[in-house]
Image: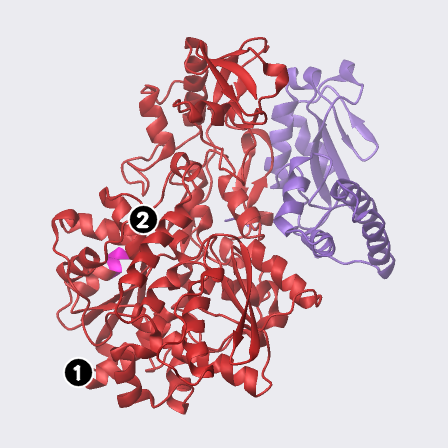
Chain colours: A red, B purple
């Protein structure tokens, strides 16, 4: 333990604790901009500086571990010199910032703006001088990059490199000319960026943002000729409430359905239905591969960021990918085929919208081989954040809305579908159905597979299923996928079934979710908190296995026949091909 | 976004490629191997085009952006080959005070390239340098081995015209 004083009061903290953490443990918040726990501790932004007795200059609190040499030192966290320094740092940042706050996607939720307010930086032109003028990169389907709002904190770079092991963005040039961009000034669309959006949720300002597709949705809703339907993914209900003041980990399923109905959608569906369908097809595909000598390990295909990653970085594993479309695309395909026919609607007249925790879904809807009815399975994909915008724009008082249900028949999914939003959820859902099938379809087959739950990046489990050992692995975060796939390739790991989700912790922490500032992310595990919401919904569901869902039974009886049937393949399965984009 | 690929088409001899691979295999695995690899690659090719950086990135198992970030950080690395005539303008203190910045700007304007670039015909490359020890002649520039001192902006066009082959 080290005995120190913070603002004159004595504390005892563990050796190795940073000044910032020591202060936090004792009720003092030190502001930060560049620090992002676990991935970006570089002491670069100088916002977290403190005065420390014996030190020649101000010290960056985020990267200073306290040791026995600091015994007895006094740390001043908010002295006049400290506050003056933080203020000047902000003024200098603003001197090279376009301050386009009014129309900025992050206005009101911008860490730079909030700090300026906190520290009373109201004269935005304190330092006049040269300003960089960077081109805005709008090339990719899912996001734009506006470096004129960038503060060079490198949180996005760290997210891309450390979480995802990709690194297609980085700091180029030096000094004043430094720009976070792609190699050779390439458009993001020409790189092997997987569209996961982890850089967006890491960004403290409006420099990175999803492409706003809400205008397309408003336009469709205003068109009397169109039948506008919407589906919403399991993870959306686990984070949406945060935007309306609910504590993290609160699910807002009922109000979500109610808000979509009030926005004017003709039908409000739950992607959980698509997730249940995915399980029916995927469990069937897995059993088929095991029994008939197919390519193993089979790897899940729900996460479009992961699919893009596999196509660019591990094309040798494409035969291992399940041919199942993602739940979004399966639900979309059923809407435009089965549901359209049942309701006598021309699929060309349907505008199918999805609300997703994901930015890669914006890319996925334009993929080849995703048009079961001859038109794209899904037309517009918006993120959780864009839905928040729509709810606010429509004047809906979200918290006052009643709790409603989704529309039948593509409605309430099983508990298995709900947990798709968390890492390990797809695996557990698949096991619920696969184990049931492999063990003689006993109604009391196991429901919970706790070994695959939790936020760890790589998990292994082994199950004895009707006398055979089924070995599985679950990874989230593509850097972890890279590790695991390399081990599989080298023969160091032997598993039959792998679940990969591109985002760390799974879709609950997706790149399209409500953005939590670093100040929250650094001290709360948002992956675990949001996952709790999904697991509580699962345990409360009457139906917890996909094959028991009445809606699923109906669609197979009336339309698909059985899992893996010819028509199921036409409607619900897809294909992949290697990509040669710049890595 | 402006794609900053070199204007001159890339070509390499089998010897160059072999040498590069030798360098990479020798250095890779050491901590901090990227810098010595880049330095030697520039010696082999004279510059570091996207093709060379891509080979280095792939062989080292890092992203192209990582390589490019280092290349653009250090002034010693060049993304473009040197021209038949290599123009260096001294932007050291003495020359700068005497107006070499204006000379440099005039050259960029006349050649229609930026510092560090090469004209599309491969004739002129332009770069800034620090003191070449001829402060008494400030402002100074060199074109290959020719030294031009006490320059004025108006002279620059005539000097370029001398290199007309």
Location of the C terminus of chain A (image quadrant):
bottom right
Give the SS element for disc 1: loop
Q: Which residue is mark 1?
A: A343
Q: Can residue A573 be seen?
A: no
Q: Are marks 2 and 1 in contact (CB under 8 Å)?
A: no
In percent of width and height, residue A354 lies at 29, 64
Closest to the observer, A331 or A89: A331
Please say if A419 is above or below A34.
below
Q: Which residue is mark 2?
A: A249
| Magenta-drawn stretch contains A434 | no
Closest to the observer, A289 or A440: A440
Q: Can residue A366 be seen?
A: yes
**Neighbours of disc 1 within 10 Å: few (<14), some (14-19), many (20+):** few
- In which quadrant of the rendered view does residue A73 lie? top right
**Prevailing secondary structure of the magenta residues:** helix
**Residue range of the region highlighted in magenta in the rendering:** A212-216
């Amino acid at each position: 333990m080290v005995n120190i004083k913070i603002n004159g009061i004595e504390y005892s903290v563990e050796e190795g604790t940073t000044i910032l953490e020591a202060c936090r443990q004792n009720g003092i918040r030190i502001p930060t901009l560049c620090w992002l726990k676990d991935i970006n501790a570089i002491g670069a932004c100088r916002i977290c500086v403190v005065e420390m007795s014996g030190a020649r200059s101000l010290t960056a609190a985020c990267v200073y571990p306290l040791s026995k040499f600091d015994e007895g030192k006094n740390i001043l966290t908010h002295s006049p010199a400290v506050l003056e320094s933080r203020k000047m740092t902000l003024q200098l940042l603003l001197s090279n910032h376009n301050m386009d706050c009014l129309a900025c996607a992050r206005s009101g939720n911008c860490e730079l703006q909030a700090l300026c307010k906190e520290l009373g930086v109201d004269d935005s032109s304190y330092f006049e001088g040269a300003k960089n003028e960077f081109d805005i990169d709008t090339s990719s389907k899912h996001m734009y990059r506006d470096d004129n709002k960038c503060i060079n904190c490198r949180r996005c770079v760290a997210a891309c490199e450390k979480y995802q092991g990709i690194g297609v963005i980085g700091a180029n040039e030096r000094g004043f000319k430094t720009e976070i961009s792609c190699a050779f000034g390439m458009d993001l669309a020409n790189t092997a960026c997987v569209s996961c959006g982890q850089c967006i949720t890491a960004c403290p300002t409006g420099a990175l943002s999803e492409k706003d597709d809400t205008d397309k949705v408003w336009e469709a809703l205003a068109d009397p000729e169109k039948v506008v339907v919407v589906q919403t993914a399991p993870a959306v209900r686990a984070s949406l409430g945060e935007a309306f003041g609910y504590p993290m980990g609160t699910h807002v399923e009922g109000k979500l359905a109610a808000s979509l109905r009030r926005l004017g959608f003709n039908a409000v569906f739950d992607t959980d239905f698509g997730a249940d369908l995915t399980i029916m097809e995927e469990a069937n595909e897995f059993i088929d591969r095991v029994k008939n000598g197919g390519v193993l390990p089979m790897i899940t295909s729900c996460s479009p960021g992961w699919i893009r990653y596999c196509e660019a970085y591990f094309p040798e594993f494409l035969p291992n990918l399940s041919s199942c479309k993602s739940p979004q695309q399966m639900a979309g395909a059923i809407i435009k085929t089965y549901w359209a026919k049942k309701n006598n609607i021309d699929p060309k007249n349907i505008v199918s919208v999805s609300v997703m925790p994901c930015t890669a879904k914006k890319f996925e809807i334009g993929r080849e081989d995703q048009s079961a009815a001859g038109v794209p399975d899904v037309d517009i994909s918006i993120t959780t954040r864009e839905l928040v915008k729509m709810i606010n724009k429509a004047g809906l008082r979200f918290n006052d809305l009643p709790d409603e249900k989704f529309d039948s028949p593509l409605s309430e999914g099983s508990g298995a579908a709900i947990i798709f939003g968390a890492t390990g959820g797809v695996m557990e859902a698949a096991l619920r159905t696969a184990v049931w099938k492999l063990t003689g379809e006993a109604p009391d087959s196991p429901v919970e597979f706790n070994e695959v739950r939790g936020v760890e990046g790589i998990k292994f489990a082994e199950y004895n299923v009707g006398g055979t050992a089924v070995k599985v692995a679950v990874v989230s975060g593509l850097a972890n996928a890279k590790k695991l796939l390399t081990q599989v390739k080298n023969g160091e790991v032997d598993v039959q079934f792998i679940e990969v989700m591109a985002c760390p912790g799974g879709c609950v922490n997706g790149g399209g979710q409500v953005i939590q500032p670093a100040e929250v992310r650094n001290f709360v595990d948002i992956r675990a908190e949001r996952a709790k919401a999904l697991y509580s919904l699962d345990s409360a569901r009457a139906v917890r296995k996909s094959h028991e869902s009445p809606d699923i039974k109906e669609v197979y009886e009336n339309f698909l026949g059985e899992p893996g049937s010819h028509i199921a393949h036409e409607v619900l399965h897809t294909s992949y091909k290697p990509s040669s984009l710049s890595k | 976004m402006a794609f900053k690929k070199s204007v001159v088409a890339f070509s390499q001899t089998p010897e160059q490629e072999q040498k590069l691979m030798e360098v990479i295999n020798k250095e890779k695995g050491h901590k901090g191997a990227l810098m010595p690899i880049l330095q030697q690659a520039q010696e082999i090719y004279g510059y570091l085009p996207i093709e060379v950086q891509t080979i280095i990135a792939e062989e080292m198992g890092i992203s192209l952006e990582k390589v490019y970030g280092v290349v653009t950080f250090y002034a010693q690395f060049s993304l473009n080959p040197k021209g038949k005539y290599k123009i260096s303008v001294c932007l050291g203190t003495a020359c700068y005070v005497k107006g070499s910045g204006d000379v440099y700007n005039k050259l960029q304007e006349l050649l229609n390239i930026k510092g560090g670039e090469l004209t599309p015909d491969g004739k002129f490359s332009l770069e800034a340098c620090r003191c070449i020890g001829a402060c008494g002649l400030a402002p100074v520039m060199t074109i290959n081995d020719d030294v031009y001192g006490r320059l004025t902006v108006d002279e620059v066009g005539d000097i370029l015209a001398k290199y007309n082959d």
